[in-house]
Amino acid sequence: MCAGEAASAASHLSLLRPESYECANCGGHFEARNRPTPYCTLQCGAEAKTVRYARKARTEHGDELPEAIRSALHRQVVHALTECHWDKWSGEPEPGPVTAPEVEPLADHVDALIPDADVFARRANGMKVRVLAGAELRPCDVQEWDSIWREWVNEHAR
């Protein structure tokens, strides 16, 4: 194969879409739809955004958050845990099935006292653990996520 044919083959391969992506928030795998995205659902995206916001607020203000920030954070947490679901009028494609990761990304941080069936409490605890951790526990917890997520998605596509 000559250099021109190799370059043509390489550019053709780059146009092929992956079959699935890894969710940067929960670690699940989901079907590739209209465009690359780092999250399997809007809820995972909302959780990740909330964790980044809370980590930034703690970095800037410590444990004593100003009331305005505390109120905004409370609204974001409630939204991420209860209000965020797929809306058929949003223009976003309906999320497909998500395959859970083989190992829970926060397995070492799970509170054994929270029953598996209490999904709300488990997700809230996971967010709390990520906010209070000394280092980022999920790829989407880094403050510069908005500028690096496309590269991360491409590296974790299958």
Image (spheres, grey):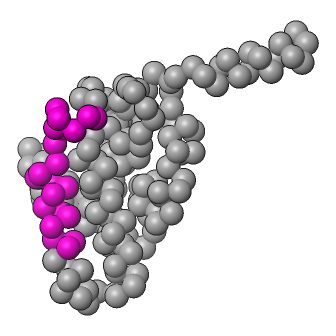
Report whether 16 appears left or right of 117: right
Give the magenta range: 72-92
Report whether 3 appears left or right of 71: right
The residue closer to the viewer here, 72 or 29, is 72
Identify the residue at image location x=18%, y=86%: 67
Q: Quadrant of residue 52?
A: bottom left
The residue closer to the viewer here, 119 or 16, is 16
Q: Quadrant of the N terminus?
A: top right
Q: Is residue 82 magenta?
A: yes
Q: Is residue 108 depicted above or below 72 in this figure? A: above
Query: Furthest residue to the top?
Result: 1
Identify the residue at image location x=57%, y=20%: 16
Q: What is the x, y in percent for residue 121?
A: 12, 57
Q: Quadrant of residue 48?
A: bottom left
Q: What is the x, y in percent for residue 153?
A: 50, 40
Q: Is residue 126 depicted above or below 10 in this figure? A: below
Q: What is the x, y in percent for residue 72?
A: 20, 73
Identify the residue at image location x=83%, y=13%: 5
